[in-house]
Amino acid sequence: MTAIDAHTSTDTRVATSSPPQPFAPEPVAGRAGILHTRREHHPHHGGRASLREKLLFVAFIAPNVVLIAVFVYRPIIMNIYYSLLDWTLGSSTATFVGLGNYLEFFTSKDAPSVLGTTAVFTIATVGGAMAIGLMLATVLNRRLHGRNVARATVFAPYVLSGVGVGLVWSFIFDPTIGVVAAILRKFSIASPQWFLDPKLSLVMVVLVYVWKNLGYCAVIYLAALQAVPRDVLEAAALDGASRMRTFWSVIWPLLGPTNFFLLLTTLLGSLQAFDIIRIMTPMGQGTTTLMYASYLQAFGSYNRAGYSAAISTVLLVVLIILTLVQMRLLERRVHYA
């Protein structure tokens, strides 16, 4: 065979050969002698897998559902039931009064004071913690000497016990032997009666609560500031924007999700504040919020468990309403990057 014939024979074999076939599973003989592939799918296999996954899901969530139902939802339901009773704490008998406890609370002379104190305390603590926390986060976000130590120092009060914080600050504000009184005496100024004046008591408790919780806001804001894209900040700098203009026009809009999260969490926490108020103002003079009013009615000199449950239910309704308002109205204005 000549070279030309060999070349022609090779081309013919290439042209006439079938194109490569895609990979096909190897056929395997089944028990009945019927050929089937290893990748053959049986509908009932998918049903078994789906059922197995559902049972596994139920097994994982069942303990949490039981715990939440027993320790969260059951107490809420029982508290609502108790709020319909005229029941003295420790008594074996109770009288059903329906909405009588609620009517008594909203028509009492103390209701405006309690609701007003709750509003002032919540607005002051939430606004103060978020504003100061943002300022501290802005400072701690820069390259400073000892920045890590400063960050830990700012966050430390948040993890401290509220009882311990209240005891320490009670000593600091003591008008006779306190640190504040000693500093004021250096300037020949008499120390205010923080614990006797209701207005000053509220100011004192607000200051301590803000000091304890601003570290939480600062850390969350710091994480959000570090997540701001650098190219955006560089573009603002190239456009000649000042630091203040860059903050309000670039950084502040990007902090929308963080502001929404902090507003929601700090608001719920402030409405449920108890430990610092209990330690610094045991009788609640000027600091009786809804939470503390419920405590005083049940465990103070009144022992009115049913009336206390009604106040707790009012607080629960306020929490639900504020949460829904924030979720429906404020979240719509938040732009997630």
Image (tube, grey):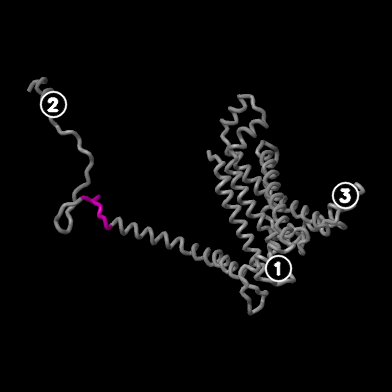
Q: Is residue 201 left or right of residue 315?
A: right
Q: Which residue is mark 3?
A: 184
Q: Residues within 10 Å of mark 2 (few under 14, many from 20)?
A: few
| Amino acid type at image mark 1 | Gln
Direction from residue 91 to residue 6 in the image, left or right? left
- Rendering coords of residue 227 (x, y %): 57, 39
| On screen, residue 164 above or below 188 | below
Q: Which residue is mark 2?
A: 10
Q: Residues within 10 Å of mark 1 (few under 14, many from 20)?
A: some
Q: Secondary structure at mark 1?
A: helix
Viewer-nearest of discs 2 and 1: 1
Q: Residue furthest bottom?
A: 92
Which residues are the magenta region?
A: 37-44
Marks 3 and 1, how far apart at CA: 37 Å
| Residue where numbered disc 1 is placed | 297
Q: Say what secondary structure mark 3 lies in.
A: helix
Work out whether residue 52 can be spotted: yes
**Residue 320 located within the stretch drawn in magenta:** no
Q: Amino acid at mark 3?
A: Leu
